[in-house]
């Protein structure tokens, strides 16, 4: 379904400003050459770059800030209070599930386990004694019952034996309960002893180490953070309004300077259906392969989630939009001439066409319909018009003349993708 947004703002890449500087450095050199050929004119004729506008649609995106988390990321806390006697891992080390991380002093826990085991044995012996007495009394009761049936025993003697049997049964039940209590205490002490060796609950990499030999730790002290770095999760916060158009499975892009290409595609993996009662927000997660480990847990990244398309409009590179300081308007410098026919037909080594003869350029205010990461959809410019992408500041506030180098969209996007390292290389060259 097509949608119209009067202004759908997405921040330009950091490389865009750097690319403009690189392009201007090249254009200044071109302008100097043009000036040498126009010494008879009253002023220097600048050189600019221009691209041909085209018609199309832009993807509608929601830009969010995300935080990187490792897969199965978990904080490691001790379950008991004890002194650290040995730390077996360091930050950055990879461990397997069940591998020991820290050893705590276990003397007190071994002593408690021995006491609990001894107490269990005593109570077990008491239970056997109670069961033996119960069997003895039950046998005596049967004898008295037989005599009473033959009227050889008094009713009082029978009643006394029955009472003794009930008491013996109660002693057995009490001994059994004590044995269960002793066994539970022994199991607890055994578990506490096992907690003196803190083991990895999952396989992954160790980080945030905060354990040293001699340190007294307790269940409130975090010792490590553990997680799998080859797969990460990016967490973003969604408002209740965003849930009307964002859903699981939609395409997204993770933008970060830590990534080799600057971005990584992924799908919106999960959205929690429970919103916070105060902020009315919820969390969403994006699963992302990270085999080279470029993304680290805790990093902030930018996330673009694609959820539709804008209406059809004239598309321009973002670098073509110019904030005119004199008029206070956003617009473009354009030429409706067929610039390719004005060139000598020669092209540079990188495929760009040669400079044209001096051309007239006019500043035209535009209505921005939608913005993408590289392009903008506008009204006020027709498809096929040539718009200046570099060198607008060399022109007048309303119009001007310049020698124009027609370029292709690929070249403009290449400039817009320039990073600092590319810019320095271009400047040196």
Image (cartoon, helix red, strand yellow):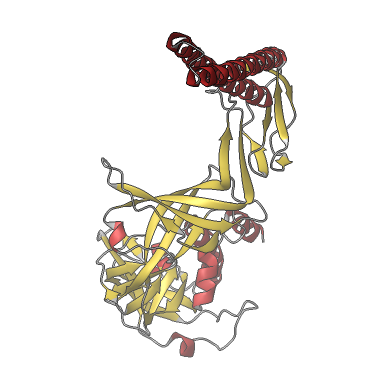
Where's residue 202, x and y in %? Answer: 64, 43
Residue drawn at the location 55% of the way across and 18% of the way down: 172
Q: Measured along the vertical axis of the image, is residue 359 above or below residue 171? A: below
Question: Does residue 248 sit above or below 411 in this rendering?
Answer: above
Q: Is residue 106 left or right of residue 423?
A: right
Quadrant of the frame with the C terminus: bottom right
Question: 248 left or right of 24?
Answer: left
Q: Is residue 96 above or below residue 61?
A: above
Q: Nearer the viewer, residue 77 or 400?
A: 77
Q: Quadrant of residue 211?
A: top right
Q: Nearer the viewer, residue 60 or 273?
A: 273
* Rendering coords of residue 395 (x, y %): 38, 66
Of residues 224 and 364, the one drawn nearer to the viewer in this rendering: 224
Q: Nearer the viewer, residue 29 or 412?
A: 412
Q: Is residue 142 above or below residue 367?
A: above
Q: Quadrant of the N terminus?
A: bottom left
- The picture places residue 333, in percent across and down from the top left corner, at 35, 72
Determine if residue 218 is in view.
Answer: no
Report how many numbered discs are placed on residues in the image.
0
- Residue 134 position by quadrant: top right
Residue 280 visible in this rendered orientation of the protein:
yes
Residue 273 position within the rendered picture, expressed as x and y whole percent measured from the top left: 34, 53
Q: Which residue lies at the image location 65% right of the left edge and 51% below the top edge?
A: 293
């Amino acid at each position: 379904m097509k949608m119209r947004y009067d202004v759908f703002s997405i921040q330009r890449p950091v490389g865009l400003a750097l690319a403009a500087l690189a392009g201007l450095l090249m254009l200044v050199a071109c302008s100097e050459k043009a000036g040498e050929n126009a010494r008879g004119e009253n002023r220097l004729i600048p050189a600019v770059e221009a691209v041909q506008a085209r018609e199309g649609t832009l993807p509608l995106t929601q830009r969010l800030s995300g935080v990187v988390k490792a897969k199965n990321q978990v904080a490691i806390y001790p379950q008991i209070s004890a002194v650290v006697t040995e730390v077996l891992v360091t930050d950055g080390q990879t461990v397997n599930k069940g591998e020991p991380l820290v050893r705590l002093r276990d003397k007190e826990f071994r002593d408690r386990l021995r006491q609990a085991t001894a107490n269990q044995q005593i109570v077990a012996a008491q239970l056997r004694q109670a069961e033996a007495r119960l069997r003895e009394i039950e046998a005596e009761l049967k004898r008295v019952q037989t005599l009473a049936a033959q009227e050889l025993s008094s009713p009082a003697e029978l009643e006394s034996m029955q009472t003794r049997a009930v008491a013996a049964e109660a002693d057995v039940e009490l001994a059994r309960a004590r044995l269960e209590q002793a066994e539970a205490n022994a199991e607890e002490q055994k578990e506490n002893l096992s907690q003196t060796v803190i083991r990895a609950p999952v396989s992954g990499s160790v980080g945030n180490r905060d354990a040293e030999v001699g340190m007294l730790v307790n269940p409130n002290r975090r010792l490590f953070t553990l997680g799998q770095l080859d797969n990460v999760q990016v967490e973003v916060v969604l408002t209740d309004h965003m849930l009307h158009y964002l859903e699981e499975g939609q395409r997204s892009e993770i933008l970060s300077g830590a990534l080799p290409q600057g971005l990584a595609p992924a799908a919106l993996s999960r959205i929690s259906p429970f919103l916070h009662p105060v902020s009315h927000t919820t969390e969403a997660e994006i699963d992302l392969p990270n085999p080279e480990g470029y993304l680290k847990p805790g990093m902030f990244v930018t996330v673009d989630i694609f959820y539709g398309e804008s209406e059809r409009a004239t598309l321009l590179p973002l670098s073509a939009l110019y904030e005119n300081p004199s008029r206070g308007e956003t617009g473009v410098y354009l030429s409706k001439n067929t610039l390719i026919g004005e060139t000598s037909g020669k092209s540079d080594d990188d495929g760009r066409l040669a400079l044209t003869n001096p051309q007239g350029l006019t500043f035209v205010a535009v209505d921005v319909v939608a913005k993408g990461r590289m392009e903008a959809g506008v009204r006020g410019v027709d498809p096929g018009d040539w718009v200046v992408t570099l060198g607008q500041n060399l022109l007048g506030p309303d119009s001007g003349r310049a020698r124009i180098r027609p370029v292709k969209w690929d070249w403009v996007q290449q400039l817009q993708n320039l990073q600092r390292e590319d810019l320095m290389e271009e400047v040196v060259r």
